[in-house]
């Protein structure tokens, strides 16, 4: 795993954007693996800026997102569909029908999870996947556990994740307790993975991510097995050498 330590969040966002920029330039119909949360927002700002300056064209780009709350309507401002529309898709010339997010309203969750994995395969797989990391070491919503899932699935969110997500809600009782997430197998199929971490709240998770140990209680630690991963983090997240 390559590790790049930068001074602050802006630099982290710009470093991540350079990688995405190259992928989109080289392969105009690439498949981007996208994530929600605070950390990738700076990356999305950089990509939207590049589009505004006429440097990037999203007209043929396809996207798949890692996860979505369940149950939730795509028009709910707390949904990840809403998040992606406002933070990126509405700011660039992407065709929304080429953007894919797990169905937060599915009546048959098992079937729609299976279809989501088939869809990613049909698109030809993810060229570059951005990931945040949870304070508890989760990636997507693959929460710490004795066993981890390979495929897209419905999962219960841990108390720690519910607490972390509460900052986006008016009160904690309205924070969703379940989500649909790509599994570790799906994430690992991405040809390249860019994992971003900012701030000292992520320091413990980052230390475990680069520990040379694999631990299903820190799902991100398994990324050490992937052949093409870069961790971009700021000083606060990296801590001391
Ligand atoms: P954050 O979330 O970017 O909002 O810190 C990351 C995550 O939980 O995966």
Image (cartoon, helix red, strand yellow):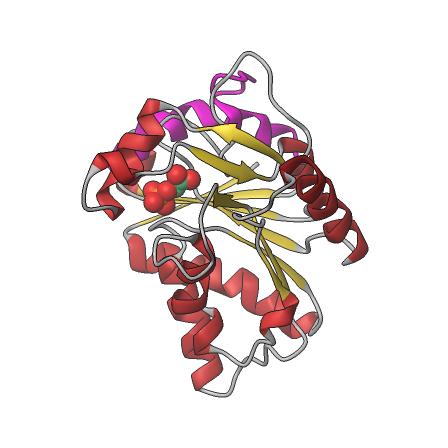
Confirm whether residue 227 shows in the render.
no
Q: Give the range drawn in magenta.
A: 200-227
Q: Looking at the picture, how far across and down is residue 41, in whole percent?
A: 37, 59
Residue 207 in magenta? yes
Judging depth in this view, the residue of 134 and 71 nearest the camera is 71
At a point 43% along the width and 51% down the height, the residue shown is 36
At a point 61% along the width and 43% down the height, the residue shown is 107
Q: Looking at the picture, how far across and down is residue 126, in whole percent?
A: 68, 53
Direction front: furthest residue: 107
Instruction: Examine the rendered structure and indicate whether residue 34 appears above or below residue 14.
Output: above
Q: Is the magenta stretch mostly helix, strand or loop?
A: helix
Q: Looking at the picture, how far across and down is residue 119, in whole percent?
A: 74, 52
For residue 209, side relative to residue 30 (left or right): left
Confirm whether residue 94 shows in the render.
yes
At a point 43% along the width and 22% down the height, the residue shown is 208
Instruction: Examine the rendered structure and indicate whether residue 61 appears above or below residue 108.
Output: below
């Amino acid at each position: 795993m390559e590790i790049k330590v930068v001074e602050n969040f802006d630099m982290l966002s710009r470093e991540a954007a350079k990688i995405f920029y190259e992928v989109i330039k080289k392969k105009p119909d690439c498949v981007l693996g996208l994530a929600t949360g605070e950390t990738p927002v700076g990356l999305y700002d950089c990509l939207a800026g590049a589009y505004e300056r006429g440097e990037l064209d999203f007209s043929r780009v396809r996207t798949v997102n890692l996860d979505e709350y369940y149950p939730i309507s795509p028009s709910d401002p707390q949904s990840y569909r809403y998040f992606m529309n406002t933070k990126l898709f509405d700011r660039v010339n992407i065709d929304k029908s080429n953007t894919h997010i797990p169905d937060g309203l599915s009546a048959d969750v098992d079937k729609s999870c299976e279809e989501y994995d088939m869809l990613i395969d049909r698109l030809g797989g993810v060229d570059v996947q951005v990931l945040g990391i949870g304070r508890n070491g989760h990636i997507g919503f693959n929460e710490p556990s004795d066993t981890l899932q390979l495929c897209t699935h419905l999962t219960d969110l841990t108390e720690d994740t519910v607490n972390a997500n509460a900052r986006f809600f008016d009160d904690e009782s309205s924070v969703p307790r379940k989500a649909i997430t790509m599994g570790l197998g799906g994430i690992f199929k991405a040809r390249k993975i860019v994992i971003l971490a900012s701030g000292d709240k992520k320091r413990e998770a980052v230390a475990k991510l680069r520990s040379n140990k694999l631990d299903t209680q820190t799902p991100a630690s398994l990324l050490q097995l992937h052949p093409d991963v870069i961790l971009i983090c700021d000083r606060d997240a990296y801590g001391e050498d």
